[in-house]
Amino acid sequence: MENFICVQCGTQFSESAKPPLHCPICEDERQFVRHSGQEWTTLERLAADHRNRLEEEASRLLGIGTEPEFAIGQRALLVQSPAGNLLWDCITLLEDRTIAEVNARGGIRGIAISHPHYYTTMVEWAEHFDAEILLHTADREWVMRTSPRIRFWEGTRLPLWDDLRLINCGGHFEGGTVLHWPAGENGKGALLTGDIIQVVQDRRYVSFMRSYPNLIPLGATAIRRILEQVESVAFEQIYGAWWKANVLSDAKAALRKSAERYLRAITS
Ligand SMILES: [Zn+2]
Ligand SMILES: [Zn+2]
């Protein structure tokens, strides 16, 4: 028996004797099946020719990504907080070096994930670090490996320790979630957004899509909802899903002008 991993999206599945026939996450219109067809690997095989890069994205914010790039290619973020660290988003590869580095920074109290594209091997991480996984219940159908460590939350807000807070913005996925980290940027606040709010190449702006690889935009109602959900929280920075994909100053204004630009484009 093996917990197979989809090579295209990096999602690990519940134990099976043979690789699954399908990956529902890749067959969904927001992802795609690779041109050469569905392919599977295991954590052990992945660890044989990949390693994680660990690098500070900011003070008390450790980026963790895989090299060479694997699956979707996002990097996770370890938010180091006094009452316990939070792993924001997740990546597939977990190896000894990463475990040691994360433990040296105080381990992981909880894992929160923006949306199903980054569920990856969340259960492996939770088991290694004895952590709870917090997922929005609207996306529960996309969990491919179940575990008693997963707690599904409902509504639009989930307060955590040290004033950390999960906010359901929807958009890209119904359960699409961002994390408010009030201690970020010396107390001015930061928003960690995965690709619910996507930091684009021009890092003075962000954008929003139902599907990034298939270029399916979001409608005006979804854009307005994202804005409304983060209106009441203070933040100076936005940390996106990729290395250095961050808006480092005046991020709340950047979000507002990006949303206005987007609404002009889809309604004119
Ligand atoms: Zn997949
Ligand atoms: Zn995504």
Image (cartoon, helix red, strand yellow):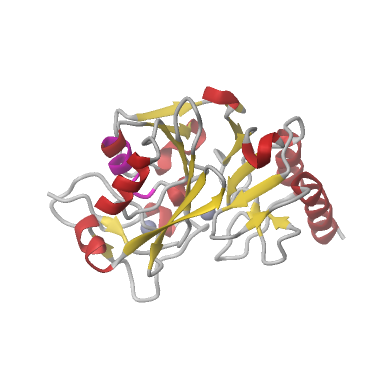
Q: Nearer the viewer, residue 181 or 117?
A: 181
Magenta stretch holds residue 126: yes
The answer to whether 232 appears left or right of 167 in the picture is right
Q: Nearer the viewer, residue 153 or 219?
A: 153
Q: Is residue 155 visible?
A: no
Give the quarter of the image for residue 210: bottom right
Residue 268 placed where, x, y %? 87, 60
Residue at 85% of width from left, 57% of height from top?
264
Above/below status of 115 relative to 53 = above
Q: Main secondary structure of the magenta part?
A: helix
Magenta stretch holds residue 104: no
Above/below status of 174 relative to 255 = above
Residue at 36% of width from left, 57% of height from top?
10
Tell me the magenta residue range: 120-127
Residue 87 placed where, x, y %? 45, 40
Above/below status of 29 relative to 238 = below
Q: Is residue 249 visible?
A: yes
Q: Nearer the viewer, residue 107 or 148?
A: 107
**How many circles with numbers are drawn on the protein?**
0
Q: Quadrant of ligand 1?
A: bottom left
Residue at 51% of width from left, 52% of height from top?
56
Residue 133 placed where, x, y %? 40, 33
Residue 49 placed where, x, y %? 26, 69
